[in-house]
Amino acid sequence: MVYPLIEESEKSDLKDLTDGFESISRRFPLPKYAVSIVHGRMPQATKDYEMARFKKGETNVLVATTVIEVGVDVPNASVMVIENADRFGLSQLHQLRGRVGRGAEQSYCILMTGDKLGNDARTRLATMVRTNDGFEIAETDLRLRGPGDMMGTQQSGLPELLLADLIHDAELLQQARASALRILDADPDLVAPAHARMAAALRDQIRDNTVWGRIS
């Protein structure tokens, strides 16, 4: 069971791990069942201990935050339930889903949401339901969030191109890149007279965008 928050927040109505752990423990009581809990505020040794218990089958249910997103390999885990799945990004949902289905058993990932969803959230969830293809998921994520600014610190959104749209003109941009690579293969230093204007434009761009040292 994956929750977006550790504790209840007055600023949101998202389901939280603390309440979820109590509810799940009541639904799957001792001694027949055992429930583990893992979140980012726990000491690493405690997280490792709880994950080891779950992997060995000493606990039947693991209640966690997205701390289990990567680096967790439990082949016998076959069902994942993600609460408030509409609040997670596509890549994160795809990473989480990859924690189940690692063994021979038929596996399921159940995405729980409220009934008030925006268009982007509906697209994310529909994509998750439709495909397991990481490339298709990444492409949809790029279309929804944008790539950010490669030359700056912005991590999402679309860069401002003068003559093209990164999503709608993707094929044209690929052709332009292929043409640029052919030119550079033939004239790496752009010294040919035919490439003089390109060389001048590149020098201007480099002079106006020397921000690499400020990126952290």
Image (cartoon, helix red, strand yellow):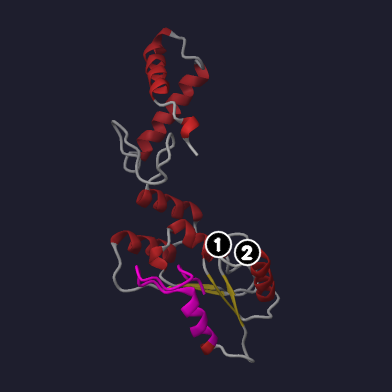
Find residue 69 and name its label: 1
Q: Residue at x 56, y 63 (%)?
A: 67
Q: Which quadrant of the structure image shows residue 148?
A: top left
Q: Is residue 36 above or below residue 202?
A: below
Q: Give the alpha-carbon distance from disc 1 to disc 2, as whole Å.
A: 7 Å
In the picture of the structure, the residue carrying the numbered disc 2 is 72
Residue 202 forms part of the magenta stretch: no
Type of the residue with mark 2: Val
What crowding class fits label 2: few (fewer than 14 Cα within 10 Å), some (14-19), or many (20 or more)? some
- Region in magenta: 1-25
Q: Position of residue 145 (x, y in %)?
A: 37, 50
Q: Residue at x 48, y 25 (%)?
A: 181
* 8 or 30: nearer the viewer: 8
Type of secondary structure dominating the magenta stretch: loop
* 20 or 190: nearer the viewer: 20
Type of the residue with mark 1: Glu
Q: Position of residue 39 (x, y in %)?
A: 56, 68
Please say if the residues under marks 1 and 2 sit with CB atoms less than 8 Å apart: yes
Residue 156 visible in image? yes
Q: Secondary structure at mark 1?
A: loop
Q: Is residue 175 above or below residue 32?
A: above
Find residue 60 and name its label: none
**32 left or right, relative to 132:** right
**41 left or right, relative to 122:** right
What crowding class fits label 1: few (fewer than 14 Cα within 10 Å), some (14-19), or many (20 or more)? some
